[in-house]
Image: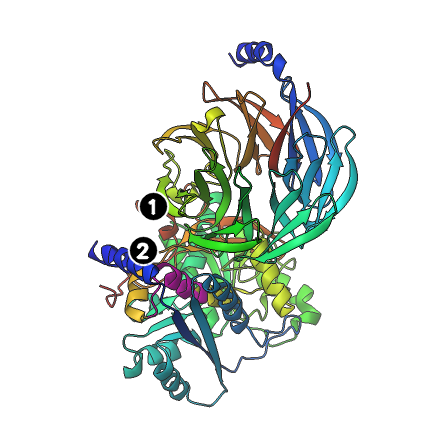
Amino acid sequence: MIRTTLAALLLTTTANAGEIWVTNEKDDTVSVISTETLEVIKTYETGERPRGITFSKDFSLLYICASDSNAVQVMDPNTGKILHDLPSGEDPEQFVLHPDDRHLYIANEDDAITTVVDTQTRKVVAQIDVGIEPEGMAVSPDGKIAITTSETTNMAHWIDTETQELFANTLVDSRPRHAEFVKDGAEMWVSSEIGGTLTIFDTATQAEMGKISFEVQGVHPDRVQPVGFEFTAGDSHAFVALGPSNHVAVVNAETYEVEDYILVGRRVWHMDFNEDRSLLFTTNGVSGDVTVIDVAKREAIKSIKVGRFPWGAAFRPTN
Amino acid sequence: MHRLVAVVFALCCAMSTAAEVTLNTNYLHVEIPLPPILSNLDPIPENIGLAGVLTGLKDNQTTGRFLDQKYELTETYVPEGEDPLVAAKALLATSPYLILNAPAEVQMAIADLPEAQGALIFNTSSGSISLRDGECRTNLLHTLPSDAMRTDALAQVFVKKRWTDLVMITGTHPQDVAYAQAVRQSLTKFGLDLAGEKEWAFDADMRRNASQEVPLFTQDFGDYDAMILADELHDFGRYVLYNTWEARPVTGSEGLSAVTWSPVIEQWGAAQLQSRFEKANDRQMTSVDYAAWAAMRTLGEAVTRTNAADPETLRNYILSDAFELAGFKGRPLTYRDWNGQLRQPIAIVHPRALVAQAPLDGFLHQVNELDSLGLDRPESTCEAFQ
């Protein structure tokens, strides 16, 4: 059954050649998965404890948060060579690239700071005091607002990217982990790992619009811990990693209702789609693998062994 | 239900007015004489407990910065021989919030002071079961797990590993005796038996002759699955490991231990708390530090969510379903509303790694798996919270 599904997929995705790059937190490597063959095709060494991972707009550069090396590394994805390090502040965990393709907003987990780095001059542009253990990072599509969520302070901090100053701080449930702007920036979503919820904010007013909770059959609510999430084409649905419950939830982004739960690997953390968003790749930290989900069918179709504690995932096209 | 509504109401309306809130907290450390122990390897840090409170204070202050909420702390040490009640009275006159590092009987006396009525006091240092049972106090919450929570965690490991034939060596200090009693109760609770028990009765220096004495001392236990040590002051236990007649695992106060906190915990974001603590204190975080941190963070979390600083509002919120503390143990921590104990997973560790975390898989509970550890609602005879 799985084989036939795969064969069908291979036929339909050939126009979608690409790679999913996965950071392996406890192996100091990135694994490169072909979105066609669904196999690891390369593994490159990185600095210590790689976590956040993202590509430049033209996919010619790969940025990696090497947390324990206290640097953001810039890699040539065609060769796997580290070109240079960017100053990042201490313990960079997660970051987001501004739509200007130039500024990185970096969460410094150990320092309660968000660092803004200019990737061209390789200089720190600003450091902004935020709450304890900053982690989730997002930038609005128009580039005007950056978000940092702080895990112990339990807030989303709203940064004006022009002044690099905070203009709002909104409380969310315990241990916020990830943030995303949705629907052309009209909404901003934050996941709370220990609170077990997603909070949705109206970007214009920073007011809370709604909250989503999860219920996985046979799993104690305490273990249902939303972390990373990504949206399908058109932002119609969110796929939400639920950490140690080993499930990904499918949330209707219009009604805020949870429609499905998909069993994946252990401690599912972050994810990314292939080019046409027909396949979703989730990192499963404890089982050390990546689960491939058929988005239309909402089924896990394959597990791919990667390094130890896969953390972040980023897609790049290769055709 | 009424309480919850009240809390939500307080939250919404207080937030909109955004008045500045200041929470003053006192930390009281009552110094006690400790009996000498055999090894000099592990001195007890002078700032044990206080270092945890200060870490929690800094966490609260950072959050408070964004909400116009301020936190202040005054620490007081009562030297041996001085009356802790005098100090406690003076502190309670300045603030209703008191974080205690003191023996159980001193904590009871402080909680019973007329000045303490309506106060919110945190026990961060005593695992005494009676404090969570018949001797509970309505104004006393416990962030340190009870001895029963730790020994229940250990019993779950025994059941899971099918170590059913157990023996125990017990020290003679009151803490050892209390721990041994907790072990016996936990074994009964989980359907296990003690096949043998001996009291540690050596007065020699085991650093030199453990390899000669311990094999003989443990020989008459015969065969067994695991040995439990009740040595809460860490006097003799370390010399028992690898010196037993039978080659069997050693558990309890040494070896495979059930603890509140340990430097080997790095999952669930704990690495961040550990590194914050170590940077500030040049040492590793102990269980008492963790309990003290949790007390301070409990207050902070309640102030953040209610924007209030009066003890009644905070106590109601802390004991409500709305409260949850992210305690770096992989689950939200909440308080038992029948005896004021902070529910929390218990780490099963050896000195180099985390082995398991209780409640272990398979130990189910009709309400909350965490309540398979320690005094559950039907077991506790505490009436003060009703």
Circle 2: residue type: Asp
| Left or right position of B246 against A120 | left
Q: Secondary structure at mark 2?
A: loop
Residue on which the image places disc 1:
B365
- Spot occupied by residue A183 in the image (x, y as percentages of width and height): 45, 33
Labels 2 and 1 touching (C-beta < 8 A): yes
Q: Residues within 10 Å of mark 1 (few under 14, many from 20)?
A: few
Residue B85: which quarter of the image?
A: bottom left
Residue B25: which quarter of the image?
A: bottom left
| Left or right position of A29 against A194 | right
Residue on which the image places disc 2:
B376
Is residue B4 something that shows in the picture? yes
- Spot occupied by residue B371 in the image (x, y as percentages of width and height): 36, 52
Kindly identify the residue that appears in the image at 39 percent across and 88 percent down: B86
- Magenta stretch encompasses residue B299: yes
Rendering colour mode: rainbow
- Is disc 2 in the same subunit as disc 1? yes
Q: Which segment did they paint magenta?
A: B295-309
Is residue B221 something that shows in the picture? no
Circle 1: residue type: His
| Left or right position of A193 against B322 | right
Kindly identify the residue that appears in the image at 42 percent across and 27 percent down: A236
Please tell me whether the stretch drawn in magenta is mainly helix, strand or loop: helix
- Does residue B339 sit above or below A187 in this rendering? below
- Magenta stretch encompasses residue A162: no
